[in-house]
Image (cartoon, coloured by chain):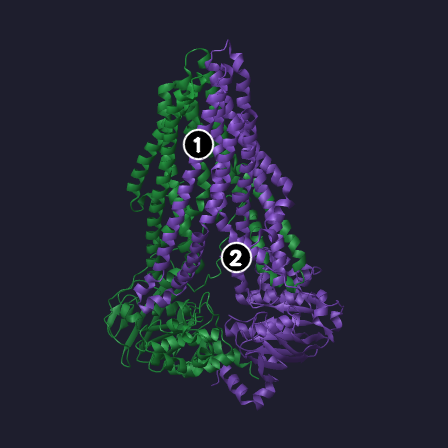
Amino acid sequence: MMNKKFSWKHEHWVKPYLAKYKWNFLLAIFLGIIMFFCGGALMFYAGYTIDKAATRPENILMIYVPIVLMRAVGIGRPLFRYLERLVSHNWILRVTSSLRRRLFYIAEKNTSAVGSAFQTGSILSLLTDDIGHLQNLYLRTIFPAILSYLVGFIVIILIGLFSWPLAGIIAILLIMELILVPFFSLLKQTSVRSKEKKEKAQLYTEFTDQVLGAGDWKISGRKDAFFNQTKTTLKSLGKHEKKSGKFDWARDFVLEFIFGLMAVAILYFTNKNLTYNQEAANYVGAVVLALFPLSDAFIPVGQGIEEWHTYSDSVKHLNELTVPENHLPHQEYLNPVFAGTLKATDISFTYPGEDYPIIQNFSLTLKRGQKAALIGPSGAGKSTILQLVLGDLKPNTGTVTLDKINVLSLQKERSKLFSVLNQEPFLFNTTIYENLKMANPDATADQMMEILEKVQLADFINSLPKKLDTEVAEAGARFSGGQKERLSLARVLLQDTPIVLLDEPTVGLDPLTEQKLLNLVFDVLKKKTVVWVTHHLQGVKYMNEVLFFKDGKVTMQGNPYELFEHNEHFHQLYLMDQGLI
Amino acid sequence: MIDKRLFKLPKAKIMLAMLAGLMFLQAFAILGQGIFLARAIVGSWKRQSFANIAEDVLTFLIFYLLRQGINWFQKWYMNRYANQTTALLRQQLLNKTYNGGIALVSRIGTGNLVSTLLDGMDEISNYLSLIFPKLIALAIVPWVILIYIFTLNALSGWILLLVFPLLILFMIILGTAAQSKASKQYAGYIKLQNHFVDALRGLSTLKVLGLAKKYGNIVYKNSENYRKKTMGVLRVAILSTFTLDFFTTLSIAMIAMFLGIGLINGNLLLYPSLVILILSPEYFLPIRDFGNDFHATLNGKNALGQIFDILVFPTTPQENQLSSFTWNKDSVFIANNVSFNYSHIDQDHFSVNKNAKMSAVVKKEQTSADKTHTADELRNVNLKLTGFQKVGIIGPTGAGKTTLMRILAGFLTPHLKEDNFTINGQNLAQLNQKNWQNQITYIPQDPFMFATSIKENLTFYNPNASQKEIDTALKATDLNNFVASLKDGLNTRIGENGRGISGGQKQRIALARAFLAKDRKILFFDEPTAHLDIETEYELKEPMKKLMENHLVFFTTHRLHWLNDMDWCLVIENGEIVEQGAPSDLAKNGTLFKKLTQPLKEDLL
């Protein structure tokens, strides 16, 4: 169970879309009603035909009309079912498109231009799962429930036209069938379902331990401990699933039983009220038989409503998503060609909800074309600095300025001023051409080839059968880590901004590839201002300044050549890094 | 359509027999329900009082409830069966995981394996508890009903009998049409489907390029295109349901008409006619049920197929050929012409058949983020090591360093040969040996932290370690201050759902784990500092050197300074050891060694 109380009144991920696509939804409901009507009518006319025929009328014409009607509704039922399914799927897919766009916008506001792709990966798959759950909620719970309520309502009205007492009894039974039992079962199962969910989460952790720790388990020789790892949770999950299963089956039986009572009630009242003459009695079979096809509308409601437990967490997640309030100051314009000094002055930053600042009193000044490296352990706040420099985060104190203009005032111009080379360059699932085009919509194929030449990818691209038009996915297997980085570097060059941020672009490459890439990067970025996050010292000779970080503070700072001469610690680190000690 | 391996599951025969019995019983309940309903209606039609038909009504209700009761029991029974079966499959899968270890996991993907163990089992359970009852119902119920109808009126019986093959035929024709239409559109369809995830994953890049805001509309447009394509496929795909419905309703209408004519002509009586009319929909019900649930169970079917495939993945269980020993300064290890490749099973074999599910509500594709690409071949490895040698392994990415480490640790089985390895004079075909592995500590680039306390993580190899030993290990790895700073100290939970810890601390915990495993004298380091920053690496150097004392050490690394602490070095390229020797000798004479180390020297300040 979630701690925060969930309120339907403020719900804004399910309800608005029912309203937004109401015509499509109502059409699907309408088709559904017609379909059930046809299903009932088929048995109605079939029953009537036989009953009427059994009175041995003079000729066949007497049953001609019901036979024609019977055929009509007989064709109507499959037809309307077909249409209903098409319309309802079309509806749900429309809703999905809107949901996706909305989710994308929210994710966009919560994402920074730098950061670890891996972490967001798991959150993203969660979010896509949530959308899937919302689809099911619409299609399997809300839609059938509303449809059944309307069908039930119409049935009561129709019966009411002939017999009020019968209509009353059917109404009571339908309320039990469609409202009391389903909602009772919804409430009753809440606690056991939430236990199941917890145990499943627990199992997920335990299985992950078994699978990811497979090597450790094996050499540890602790076979029993390995198998006992999940035993308890599996056992208690099994127990709870059995319990909830038992309840569900019993509930389904009760629902069928109530439906059976409806049949009995109809048998009784038709016997009492429809036997005043033979013509009326011919309708007895018709009315009784018309009931049975409706069980398809009524019985599944119980299960559908209880499935809310499966979707509730997703609805809650989505409703809890927040868009960070981001009041940007008045936006200014800066010509990228003349952009000069990048300056961070005494900035400090604490993540909301954290006790300790991740950045304390950080200052850095880089004139146009100067380069600085930030070095430190993971989690020390190196990427946070990049986010502050970009204006994705707002410092608690201090400012980041470009030519004395606060970067927060330059957000509209940002993609012309800053570019980023990431740790895991992301290539979109389209052609190489399209991927490059994203960086600069005006770039021609010739310009692209020129840039690719610079990043030493031209030969490789030319060796591909479709050259620039090669799909990234097709070439994916052929792209090595270094090549991906270089393609991403080509994107940076096409974007042609005065400032380039490098977020550990060489992590995971072997030293040879790394060295080659660094030589290339700093060659082509000679004239750019560069802030480079890295974790060791390869390539620091290209820097004007290196800054070492620990616990939010800069512990060592200076020009690498000077540090090497005068700082014993740096000297030692450098010798180790180069394999000299 | 149905996996034959299903019937080989344990207790399948008993379960099928049980189901057959239940379905026969249910068929008779359906007959009874129809007969007494018809009798009651005929009574009313004859304008008899309710007292006269009350008995029929009651009997109808009893048969109706009997039918539902059988359903109830059937669900309970099948659920029990499905749970027993999945528990067994899960056990087998865990066995496989334990025996197959890293070899299996890296082939199948961790995400894939975990989701198979968890969600996959739910889907299989659902599949088993639906597919068998529907199948058996289809095999029994319609035919019992049909035979009874034949005894009442042959014409109706013939109509029902003839419609059946027609119905199947049309379903197959339309099913094939839908399939071919679907597969024609499949490529574009999948591309659109993945587009959303692609856009989300690429959000940072979009933001950098200043395209993120604009892209929202592209996401929408693509989603709408996806919808249109899906609808195009669905229009054909659900035609098969339409056919089913159409033939059902049409034959009921036809039967009602013929019965009507028969009644007018006086060849028939009302009671049998009504029984036939009531039973006709029941005749079609099992095939409709089967058709409806067939799609719902496809996921389970695929998951089961995947498990069957994993279960035949060849793994060698830990063996006990090597006699018990402790590696000491005089021990000798020889690798004799060892070769290896991943030939057994293609990895693609394990990806879920995504083509199978044809519904608008599409499940997220499994993105295999952890497809570790290992060099897949190793040829003619020869090694002779004695005592507490420290062996550095270097080579370009993908040369086969990790594969070699995994073979030496017994995680992978080389090409079978009696004398692949010789340990203290004893020949062994492979190293998945109890008494070899209990000598080993394996520290990878990113050591795995179990979702439990720091203490249990530390004592993983040695659960009985004393507090004093733990304290010593903490001190040796410089963890004591970190642990002291935590509110719950050693009992702090880490790993999944626990406290997040940095890469450096993980590595320290792994080292402390190795310190505590005092009787394990062989250390494997697989690029232990590749992800660490220079200062953390510098701080770890001392404790690591201390740990390596009096151990046989295998150490793959790209960080060349470690070679200064090694006394033997293997240089690997394209799956072969091309040079080996003392690092100082290689620095003078090793061609590839120079090629790998020289360019870095140009980087000097």
Residue B591, by quadrant, is bottom left
The chain letter corresponding to purple is: A
For the residue pair A518 and A534, the one nearer the viewer reads as: A534
Chain letter for mark 2: A
Residue bearing mark 1: A261
Residue at which label 2 appears: A126
Q: Residues within 10 Å of mark 2 (few under 14, many from 20)?
A: some
Q: Residue at x 37, y 71 (%)?
A: B456
Say which amino acid is labelled 1: Leu
Name the outermost residue toward the bottom. A566
Please identify the quarter of the rendering in which residue A404 is found: bottom right
Residue type, numbered disc 2: Leu
Q: Nearer the viewer, residue A470 or A199?
A: A199
- Residue A17's place in the image compared with A120, above or below, is above
Q: Residue at x 38, y 45 (%)?
A: A246
Q: Residue A578: horizontal and vertical position, in percent?
A: 51, 82
Are both tags, 1 and 2, on one chain?
A: yes
Chain letter behind tag 1: A
Query: Is residue A359 among what the camera can see?
Result: yes
| Position of residue B27 measured from the top left corner of the image (x, y, whole percent) | 35, 30
Residues at discs 1 and 2 in contact (Cβ within 8 Å): no
Mark 1 and mark 2: Cα distance apart in space: 45 Å
Left/right placement of residue B476 relative to residue A282 reads left
Q: Nearer the viewer, mark 1 or mark 2?
A: 1
Image point (52%, 31%), residue name:
A168
What kind of element bears circle 1? helix
